Amino acid sequence: MSSLIMLITVFVLAIFVGIEIITKVPPTLHTPLMSGSNAISGITIVGALILAGALEGQDLFSPLAKTMAFVAVIFASINVVGGFLVTGRMLKMFQRK
């Protein structure tokens, strides 16, 4: 039980740190940061796929864990696609006409 509390504490602290970092970034830098977050979301996709594969044949919490891995893949994929769309729009603004 203590490891679960530790993991939840780390997760909550990561949320607070993320919010503090993002709110301090000027709006002109949000698009380049979105491009950088694509790499992080790519890592999340790979990790969730590895987790889903490692859970094959496991009986304990397997349906819940597989569902959470699937949701992680979906959300990370949405973030990657959105990041590429925003980056594409940003790069079109700087093209010569």
Image (cartoon, rainbow, N blue to C red):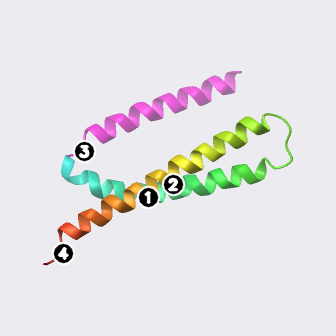
Q: Is residue 69 above or below residue 83?
A: above
Q: Position of residue 8 (x, y in %)?
A: 58, 27
Q: Residue at x 43, y 58 (%)?
A: 81
Q: Position of residue 57 (x, y in %)?
A: 86, 47
- Disc 2 and disc 4: Cα gap in Å? 27 Å
Of label 3 and label 1, which has the lower sequence position?
3
- Looking at the rendered structure, which numbered label has been put on residue 43? none
Q: Which residue is mark 4?
A: 95
- As for residue 9 lying within the magenta part, the answer is yes
Q: Position of residue 6 (x, y in %)?
A: 61, 27
Q: Tell me which secondary structure the magenta stretch mostly adopts.
A: helix
Disc 1 vs disc 2: Cβ atoms closer than 8 Å? yes
Of label 2 and label 3, which has the lower sequence position?
3
Q: Which residue is mark 1?
A: 81
Q: Which residue is mark 3?
A: 25
Of label 3 and label 4, which has the lower sequence position?
3
Task: Label 1, secondary structure: give it.
Answer: helix
- Disc 2 and disc 3: Cα gap in Å? 24 Å
Disc 2 vs disc 3: Cβ atoms closer than 8 Å? no
- Disc 1 and disc 2: Cα gap in Å? 6 Å
- Disc 4 and disc 1: Cα gap in Å? 21 Å
Disc 2 vs disc 4: Cβ atoms closer than 8 Å? no
> Looking at the figure, which quarter contains the C terminus?
bottom left
- Disc 3 and disc 4: Cα gap in Å? 25 Å
- Looking at the rendered structure, which numbered label has been put on residue 77? 2
Q: Residue at x 61, y 30 (%)?
A: 7
